[in-house]
Amino acid sequence: MSKASSVCSQRSGLAVLGALAGLSVMPTMAGTLDTVKQRGTLQCGVSEGVAGFSDKDAQGNWRGFDVDFCRAVAAAVLGDKGKVAFTPLSASERFEALKGGKVDLLARNSTWTLEREAQLGLAFAGISFHDGQGFLAKRALGVDGALSLDKAKICVEAGTTTQANLGDFFKANSMAYEEKAFPSAAEALAAFQSGQCDVLTRDQSALHGERLKLAKPAEAIVLPDVISKEPLGPVVRSDDFGWFTVVKWVNFALVNAEELGIASTTIDDALKSQKPDVRRFTGAEGGFGKALGLDADWAVRSVKAGGNYAELYERNLGTGSPLAIPRGLNQLWSMGGILYAPPLR
C-alpha cells in the first residue's frame, strides 16, 4: 500500500468514527405516544362541522362519531376521555396540520387512498366507517337518480376526493355538468341553498346531515345512488409505527367489543368473565397493554369512554340520532355487513 493510500485509509476510518460518534450523541426523538403522555392531552384534528361525525352542540361542546373515537384514544392512552383537545380543520389544511405536528391524530371523515399514504407520508389506522359519495338534489329538479343529472349545476368542496370522483362519474357516463367548487363544505352548502346549484355532492353520510341544515329540508332529497368507495378512518403520520399501532388497535378494540358483547353498560360483567377472549380484552390475560406501551386495561377504558362501536354508531349516526342512517356495510361481518377487526390475541 502506498503512503498516499495509507493516509487516505486513515482519514476514511476517522471519518467513519466521527460519524458514529456524532450519531451516539444525537438526541433520541420521542415518539408520539410518549409526547402525548408527557403533555397529558391528546391533540385531535376534526372537521369544521359535519353532523354526526364532529360538530358542536348548543353549549359549544364537541360531539359526534369521530369525536367519540378521539375520546376513546385519550381514555386508552391517558386514562381519561376528557384529556383531549379538538382542532377544527378544513379539507385543505387537515393533512398539513397532521404532518406538521399540530395534531397527533386526525379523525376527520377522511378517505383512505393510495396517494395520501404513498405521497403525503400518512398512515390510515383502519376503517371506522364505510361510506360512499352521493348527491343531495332539489326536489324541484325532478330527478330520481344520479344518471338523471346530465347538465346539472353541482356544488362541491374543492381539493377533496369528492371533487375528483365527480369528474370521473360524469366522464364515465358521457354526461355533462357545471361544477361549482368552494373552499369549504359550509360554503358549498350555502351555495346549494341559495340556488347557485341544483345538486350538492359529498359523502352520503354527510348529506343526511346537510339536508337537515336547510331552511326547508323537505325540498331536497338524498338520491339513492352511491358512486364511489369512501373508506373513512383515523389518520396518523407514517413515521411513527408505535403510535400508528396504538390508534389502530383502539379502533379494532371498539369493533371487537361489540362482537364480544362488551358495552359501556356491561363492563363490570366482562371484568368477571372467565372466557379467554374476554379476559384478553380486559387485560386479565395476554399482556397486550404492555406490548402497546399502555396499561393492561387500555381496551376497557376505550369502551368506558363512550361505548363499543355499535354504541358510538347508534348515538351519533343511527337510530339514536336525527340522521337515522342504517348501518348497512357498517354492520358486523357476522350480521351481514363488512365490519371486521383482527382478534385481540
Image (cartoon, rainbow, N blue to C red):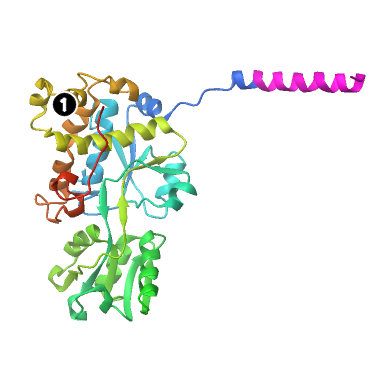
Q: Is residue 77 left or right of residue 267?
A: right
**Relative horizontal placement of residue 142, taking residue 21 as reference (left or right):** left
Q: Is residue 281 visible?
A: yes
Residue 251, by quadrant, is top left
Percent x, y of residue 112: 36, 50
Chief SS of the magenta region: helix
The three-letter code of the residue at mark 1 reads Val
Q: Position of residue 79 (x, y in %)?
A: 24, 25
> Is 230 situated above or below 152?
above
Give the labeled residue for mark 1: 278
Residue 341: x %, y % from top left: 25, 39
| Residue positioned 39% across, 62% down in the render | 183
Q: Is residue 58 visible?
A: no
Q: How crowded is mark 1: few (under 14 residues within 10 Å), some or many (20 or more)?
A: many
Number of numbered discs visible in the structure rendering: 1
Magenta segment boundaries in residue numbering: 1-21
Residue 3 highlighted magenta (yes or no)? yes
* As drawn, 49 above or below 75: below
Residue at the image position 29 percent from the left and 46 percent from the top: 127
Q: Classify residue 154 by image quadrant.
A: bottom left
Q: Whole-percent x and y of residue 272? A: 9, 20
